[in-house]
Amino acid sequence: MRDASPKPLVQVTDLKMHFPIYSGIFRRHSGDVKAVDGVSFDIQAGETLGLVGESGCGKSTVGRALLRLYEITAGKVVIDGEDVASLPPEALRKKRPTMQMVFQDPQASLNPRMTLARIISEPLDEHTDWNDARKLERVYELMDAVGLNRRFANRFPHEFSGGQRQRIGIARALALNPKFIVCDEPIAALDVSIQAQVVNLLEDLQERFGLTYLFISHDLSMVRHIADRVAVMYLGKIAELSPRDALYSLPLHPYAEALLSAVNEPDPVRAATRKRIILKGDVPSPANPPLGCNFSTRCPRVFDRCRVEDPALRQVEPGRFVACHLYDQQTAAGPTGAPEVNERNQQGELQ
Amino acid sequence: MTDAAMPKPVSQNRAIWQQFRSHKGAVFGLIVLGLLILFVLIGPLVWVPEKLKVAEAIRLKNQGPSLRFPLGTDQLGRDMLSRMMLAGRISLAVGLVAMLIAIVFGTLIGVVAGYYRRFEGPLMRLTDMFLALPLIPLLLVLVMLFRDRIASVIGPELGAFALIVFAIGITSWMATARIVRGEVLTLKEREYVLAARSIGARPRRIILRHILPNVVSPVMVAATLGVAEAIITESVLSFLGLGFPPDFPTWGRLLFDGLQYMQVYPERVIWPGLAISLTVLSVNYIGDGLRDALDPRIRGR
Ligand SMILES: Nc1ncnc2c1ncn2[C@@H]1O[C@H](COP(=O)(O)OP(=O)(O)O)[C@@H](O)[C@H]1O
Ligand SMILES: [Mg+2]
């Protein structure tokens, strides 16, 4: 299924998104929330990259920064050959049809005052000069594709269930034939019984239209179902980026290990031998991350070096990238053809 | 394709009108406001008071209601009914136009301040400044400075009207601006606005399509309160001798004139008071009905 062509569709290099904090009466710039702090990854065309992590670790910010819904602090986001992060406004507008987003809250992502037909045809209004009949034909086509009855075209979002609303959001994202779709927890707000339907729909659509997904979720079992590779994020950085099966059978990064130990294991033999790792303490604030490794405050296998030096994301096995000092000895050469992350030290970087 | 059987997206105007009609208060308000407007526009054409000589008028002052003077006469023997009608023309016009100015201006400032970060500071400081200004003295100065100049260009009555409407409009937009800005700040972060941005919609489109329709409720509330306030402010100005010329009736002025005789002739206060209250009430209900009619979540019920 995965296309192993050398040129990935999405190439993210050292992406940083810092939200400034202003405080005091004079609203002075007193610091930054480092929501995303140096993230790099590639996504091949037709692939699904899962992005997992606890709530607040910066997953949505990555997704939104990729589509340039935020002006990023630093880094490059090359999608289909163009650096989205530095495109001038009009070129960006032309680029937008290639990259779309499905949002977490299907209720909040649909304007309550617009009918379903108007919502789905909004992208067409912006990017085509079709007449109403042609737009309507396309709207019906999209409604068929996502499994919505055509009779619903004149209804308003509040008349639908969560699952149907998410289908509306998906239809809107598909309207302009995108190549790349960021799915930001598309199933988190849905009933469990509906979740599988929506995930299956996303998979069907991927196959039919050759879509590439960044699938953001905190539900590890859903990610296991849909993703080809998985990136585990912790506090604005990627801890581990591995092919799905390798990650789920043997997570390398201690954080990935802890996260996965909390997931239900379908294999009873493994389930019996596995033990749950309970992390102590809270996630530090992204406005004030710890020195050294971000995970050093909670890591069960922490040692001295972790507290002073920030580990870079390195390839430790073919296709597996880990940011952890435990694996430093094993790395012979630097990553080849892989996302390159410069080693950085938090100490030297005062914003 | 079963295209023919598919309902075409219909215009929403009918659904909106149907919901509006089902709102009893709104229909009542529309009828009352319509009657009031008819009363002040058509009334003076139908009811022409007889011209009285000064001596006669003095004899006929302070009359109670009769066939000759349905609402009685005032302290100068003038027919109250015709004065009420003429006064209503001005009061309604002042109330509605000043409210319109305040709403348009306030919404504009609020949307720009809420949507565009870089204008937020200056615009909100401007709003604060206007809020901090003592309004009545400001109005007094405005009127003193410009009344004669404007009057010499477009005539004393129209001049007074333009000046008063402008003065009231320019001093009552701040509440709307603040409410709208707050609302826009939250709407701007809604996911459907993000979705529109990810589609590549231009700011103007986003504002017209996603922001403005969703700020109608607070704007309606501010608008209906604004009408009442404008009518009252006009009467305050007239009372201070800075509004329309003294022989020019407005509801507010009739109210203040009647105040001196309230103990003896309470109806002098009751009629203009009733007219103002009915206007405010009906505008309020119309706003309420409109707000519901424009909201598909309520319309769908
Ligand atoms: N617009 C913003 N302004 C300031 N801080 C933000 C903003 N958006 C997100 N953050 C902060 O960035 C961090 C990551 O948020 P987010 O990407 O939403 O996490 P996730 O989607 O993984 O739950 C959080 O600490 C959040 O408070
Ligand atoms: Mg999120």
Image: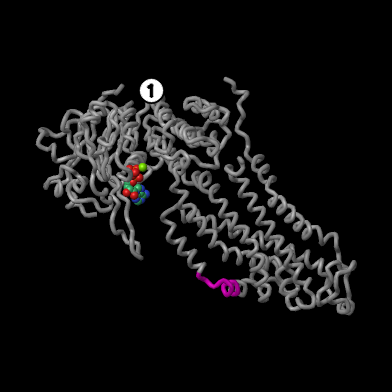
**Residue A3 to residue B171: above or below:** above
Residue B187: % across, % down: 47, 49
Disc 1 chain ID? A
Tell me what residue is drawn at x 60 percent, y 26 percent. B6
Residue nearest the observer in this picture, B151 or A206: A206
Read off the magenta span: B132-140
What is the crowding at mark 1: few (fewer than 14 residues within 10 Å), some, or many (at least 20)? few
Residue type at numbered disc 1: Glu
Q: Position of residue B252 (x, y in %)?
A: 70, 69
Quadrant field for ligand 2? top left
Count numbered badges in the picture: 1
Residue under the image location 67 percent in, 43 percent down = B17
Residue A258 percent location from the top left of the image: 23, 38
Pick out the residue farthest to the top.
B1
Provide the residue designation for mark 1: A207
Answer left or right for B68 relative to A313: right
Q: Can residue A123 be seen in the rendering of this structure?
A: no
Prevailing secondary structure class for the magenta stretch in the rendered image: helix
Instruction: Determine which quarter of the picture holds residue B139.
Output: bottom right
